[in-house]
Amino acid sequence: FWWVVAAYVLCFMAVVAATEASARSKYYFVGLFEIVLGVTWLTTGVMGIFTFGVLLRPDPLWSPQYVIPLSGMLLGNCVNAVSLAINGALTNIKEGQLEMEVLQSFGATPVEAS
């Protein structure tokens, strides 16, 4: 029953991880959870395929004794990385708003100012 393991990892564990990662940010915007969930699914999927398909190769591939604990480890690292990146980016944008406006008044583009 591979779909039970996949549903548990992708629909429960990943949603809890994305909730935690988006809640750790000092600032929030509408749609942050959906972006974090997409990033969580993408990174866990890519690393999971590499881990289970190339490194470990359990038989069967969806063996819960390997997939669930290792997916938890991958999701834990993903929560840490995503929450640090989001917090840093949103803090720089929100608290550096005055600096960005000054740079734009001197002729910088919005991308250059940020």
Image (cartoon, helix red, strand yellow):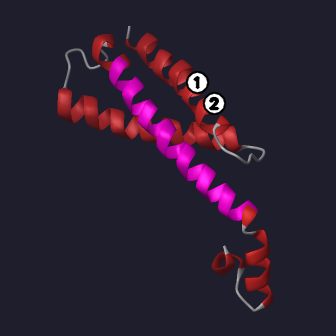
Does residue 70 appear to the left or right of 30 in the view shown? Answer: left
Does residue 87 appear to the left or right of 63 in the view shown? Answer: right
Screen quadrant of the C terminus: bottom right
Residue contact between numbered discs 2 and 1, judged by CB atoms under 8 Å: yes
Out of 25 and 48, give the one closest to the viewer: 25
| In the image, residue 31 above or below residue 53 | below
Is disc 1 placed on a helix, strand or loop?
helix
Is disc 2 placed on a helix, strand or loop?
helix
Residue located 24% across and 31% down the image: 53
Residue located 33% across and 12% down the image: 64
| In the image, residue 99 above or below residue 75 | below
Which amino acid, by three-letter code, is at mark 1?
A: Val
Residue located 34% across and 32% down the image: 48
Question: In the image, residue 65 lies at what x, y percent?
Answer: 29, 11
Circle 1 Cα neighbour tier, 10 Å, few/some/many (<14 / 14–19 / ≥20): some
Q: Is residue 57 magenta?
A: no
Q: In this picture, which residue range is highlighted in magenta?
A: 69-94
Which amino acid, by three-letter code, is at mark 2?
A: Thr
Question: In the image, residue 55 lies at what x, y percent?
Answer: 19, 33
Circle 2 Cα neighbour tier, 10 Å, few/some/many (<14 / 14–19 / ≥20): some
Decide whether the magenta segment is chiefly helix, strand or loop. Answer: helix
Residue projecting furthest to the bottom: 106
Q: Which residue is mark 1?
A: 16
Residue projecting furthest to the top: 1
Question: In the image, residue 84 lies at what x, y percent?
Answer: 54, 48
Q: Which residue is mark 2?
A: 19
Screen quadrant of the N terminus: top left
Residue located 67% across and 35% down the image: 23
